[in-house]
Image (tube, rainbow, N blue to C red):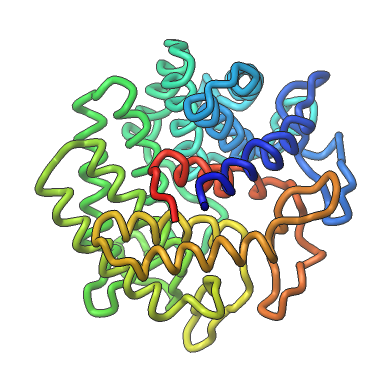
Amino acid sequence: MIIEEVKKELTGHIIPFWNKLRDDENGGFYGFMSYDLKLDKQADKGVILHARILWFYSKAYITLGDKTLLDNARHAYEFIKNHCIDYEYGGVYWMMNYKGEPADTMKHTYNIAFAIYALSCYYNASGDKEALELAYKLFHDIENNTLDEYGLHADKTMNAILHLIEAYTELYKADHNEEVAKRLKFQLGQMRDIVYTSETNALKVFFDTKFDLVGDIHSFGHDIEATWLMDLACDTLGDEELKKQFAEMDLKISHNIQNIALDNGALNNERENDKIDKKRVWWVEAESVVGFINAYQHSGEKKFLESARSVWEYIKAEIIDKREGSEWYAEVSYDHKPHDWKEIVGPWKCPYHNGRMCMEVINRGVDF
């Protein structure tokens, strides 16, 4: 049954892999492992990577209760607290060098959102009030300042809004602050009223400063990820009207993704103009398992469970790397070939999506 399978993957494969990447000399976790499993102990350390590792170990401790997980969460927390936060000007840096010194001082709303997400979850796991204070510091940095999203070809993105929703949901869990609830509802409203399009039951991706659409891209993975994160936000808020609105909207999105993106047992990546990118990306597949289970829980339609199972079977067969000392491939081609130019660990390649999938399956208790 799927719960037993994902728990084994989490505890017997994903967690042991990341445990070995702990850097006790310089702090945090090592920042890069190549496809051929060469660990670069002097690679730069991504702040998004570390926020996601902090979230992962915190949530794993909440889920499994193993105190070694909380110790690794604390180790990641100390690195973020002592190295990654800009206490003078606000926000968090983009990249640190292997010693924990700023390597790229760019500030990005997306990155700050992940720090809030991680710090809030660490507080929820540990009760460390300092972590919650830092989460609120960063929350006010976002809400009180205009933080440009440098490095993108668009002024606003669906992805940044989505991960603000994710971060504010976790922060609201901590102490049910009404200011956080207000801003969370605002971000949900942007997704419902601006990002979502009822004509296609899809989420638009890139916007300019006036929220006019930039480009013609449909990100299948972000759509299915957004469905369950938005439903979770509404559930956490306890707002019955919002829960109803988003359950209906998210089911429409889930049906659409199931109809247009599920292909030979797994999810294609995205559409740009009239071209479908059919590579299979580790995080897209992981999020689709959770998204389809969530859709089943809201609809009772068993075809969603069938889709979740098909993707999990694909993950087991194609995405999980069977080599000793590895974890999951980042990408696999449509014809089943791992992309050997993609790293196993990197600024974006982390235990957040696949570890979260395992924990969501465990915690949701839908076995099939």
The answer to whether any part of residue 67 appears in the image is yes
Residue 125 horizontal/vertical position (percent): 47, 20
For image coordinates 86% across by 35% down, the residue present is 42
Is 235 placed above or below 200 here? Answer: above
Which of the pair 311/203 is nearer the observer?
Answer: 311
Quadrant of residue 360 within the rendered picture:
top left
In the rendered image of this protein, does residue 41 appear above or below residue 191? above
Return the x and y of residue 219 as percentages of the image width and height: 46, 69
Q: Residue 286's x, y, as percent?
A: 54, 56
Q: Residue at x 71, y 80 (%)?
A: 335
- Left or right position of 210 against 15: left
**Is residue 52 shown left or right of residue 141?**
right
Residue 366 or residue 163, whichever sits in front: 366
Quarter holding residue 60: top right
Residue farthest toward the bottom in the current orientation of the protein: 274
The answer to whether residue 163 is above or below residue 178 is below
Task: Give how far across and how far down residue 177 sits, in percent.
Answer: 24, 23
Camera sees residue 156 = no
Q: Quadrant of the C terminus?
A: bottom left
Q: Residue at x 23, y 41 (%)?
A: 235
Residue placed farthest to the left in the image? Answer: 241
- Tell me how many marks there are: 0
From what the image shows, is residue 318 above or below residue 137?
Answer: below
Q: Nearer the viewer, residue 179 or 234?
A: 234
Which of the pair 255/177 is nearer the observer?
A: 255
User: Residue at coordinates 21% horizontally, 36% vertically from top-left?
Assistant: 237
